[in-house]
Amino acid sequence: MSHVTASPSTDGKAQTATTETITEALSLAIHAHRIAPGAKLGEEDLAEIYGVSRTVVRASLQALSHAQLVDIRRNRGAFVAQPTINEAHEVFEARELLEPRTARSAATQASQAEVSILRRHIADEHAAIQAGEQGQALHLSGKFHIEIARIARQKTIADFIETLIARSSLIIALYWRRESALCEKHAHHALVEAIEAGRGQDAQELMHSHLVDLHSALDLRERPRTTQSLREALAP
Amino acid sequence: MSHVTASPSTDGKAQTATTETITEALSLAIHAHRIAPGAKLGEEDLAEIYGVSRTVVRASLQALSHAQLVDIRRNRGAFVAQPTINEAHEVFEARELLEPRTARSAATQASQAEVSILRRHIADEHAAIQAGEQGQALHLSGKFHIEIARIARQKTIADFIETLIARSSLIIALYWRRESALCEKHAHHALVEAIEAGRGQDAQELMHSHLVDLHSALDLRERPRTTQSLREALAP
DNA sequence: GCACACAAAATTGTATACAATTTAAAATTG
DNA sequence: CAATTTTAAATTGTATACAATTTTGTGTGC
């Protein structure tokens, strides 16, 4: 009976909770590693937490399932997804294919206001790290990448990147090795510089090497050191 | 009161209709242009057609909504999506980014059995055209592209391509100009040859020019000559 | 006759009730 | 006491009932 503290009623959202609200709250909680991969998301629990019926909770879980953040097994329930090593490779390969091109496109289109938003993201991320909020920092790091995709004005591809980043969050939760420090600050800073100056080719290459760095900082050899619910860890 | 004849009960599927069944049936019907963009998908109608309650129909519609085949408007209902001209460009730009690379990858990995499957697809598509089944031919053409993505063994990217092709089907329904004949036979044939011979670079270039051909065969200047419900056609 | 206001019907959103299945616990047996 | 079967509890899947909203139809005033 793992109590899921996704977005407790203390947030005051219980009143206006709708499908989108819950989907967003759960997505955030997963992004920030407040809910671990493999954790069970019971419908009744969530319904009570958000003050709605199971009907609306199920809609949220289905949405998250489509984004591959949640794994729904028939008659068994919904669990936070646990990407395999193979899927982890695929996700980062896809990012290496999509994001560099997108960064180049963003460099040629970014307005000054948009560059400011990117800088704000970096500052927030840095502040979160200083405050020791590792999960929040990771979440902000993802939003930085999403913002670049949005600036590129290719909504279709930006949507793809958004789902890839969501899954990356799970992958990092499972496979990140603590040895290698998550020092994205320099990489992100250099990216913003290139984008602001309109140097598309530089932005493309910077993004690519940044992603390769991230990819190689994962430990994709052994099985995930998972925190999954005790029972499930021992059973099969 | 447009009667949606997605997959009438004469198919005998009414008994075992499940969420996935209905999603697949509707997807097929949309792919084959048996349901036009803008058509309303009433929950009660579908529930009766498939012999289930609205609950399961709603799950299907939500799934299709996530795939962007269906547009759900709150308190208004579900409609077959109508991609805008801008979205049409984006979809084909995304395909031009993803599929050539995937075709090259497929060329280096395709087994003989997989090549046979591709040839079968081409034959089926040709037969459908001969029989005058334009919709079915279009559907098979899409499956050809999906099969190549599958052969490349990049499930993540293959999933993206699958949704892009699904949306392409809607785009073609809306923006295809009848003047330009849909003669994909040669392009697909050349692609299979390159893949079978393991000529990755050729496959990549063939796929790219094939997609550029498709893209340029669309009439993306004027508004879609849509069959949408009359009211919606006149209102803003 | 046309526009507007109002009432009725139809449709979607949400909650609840019940059935089917899985999971946990208890009882039985060797 | 361990292993298996049986029974009970909990959880999910589906259908139905009711509330909220939109759409349609009708009537009234000008």
Image (spheres, coloured by chain):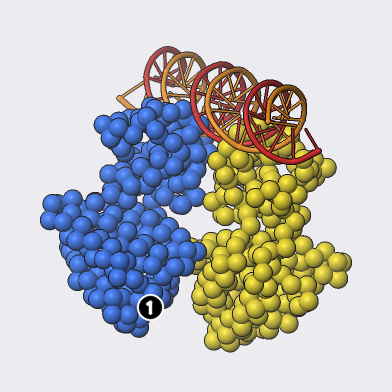
Chain colours: A yellow, B blue, C orange, D red
Q: Pointer 1 indicates a residue of which chain?
A: B
- B202 is higher (above) or lower (below) than A47: below
Residue projecting furthest to the right: A131
View extreme (left): residue: B130
- Residue B50 is left or right of residue A158, and the answer is left
Tell me the residue at 72%/59% (across/down). A226
Q: Is residue B1 above or below residue B116?
A: above
A106 or C5: nearer the viewer? A106
Q: In the image, B50: left or right of A189?
A: left
Q: Secondary structure at mark 1?
A: helix
Q: Position of residue B215 (x, y in %)?
A: 31, 68
Residue B34: image location, x then y, percent:
27, 44
Residue where numbered disc 1 is placed: B108
Q: Residue, x 54% and y 86% (percent of image)?
A: A201
Badge 1 density bin: few <14, some 14–19, many ≥20, Cα 10 Å? some
Residue sitting nearer the eye, B236 or A26 = A26
Residue at x 23% of width, y 55% of height: B137
Marks counted in the figure total 1
Kindly identify the residue that appears in the image at 45 percent across and 52 percent down: B68
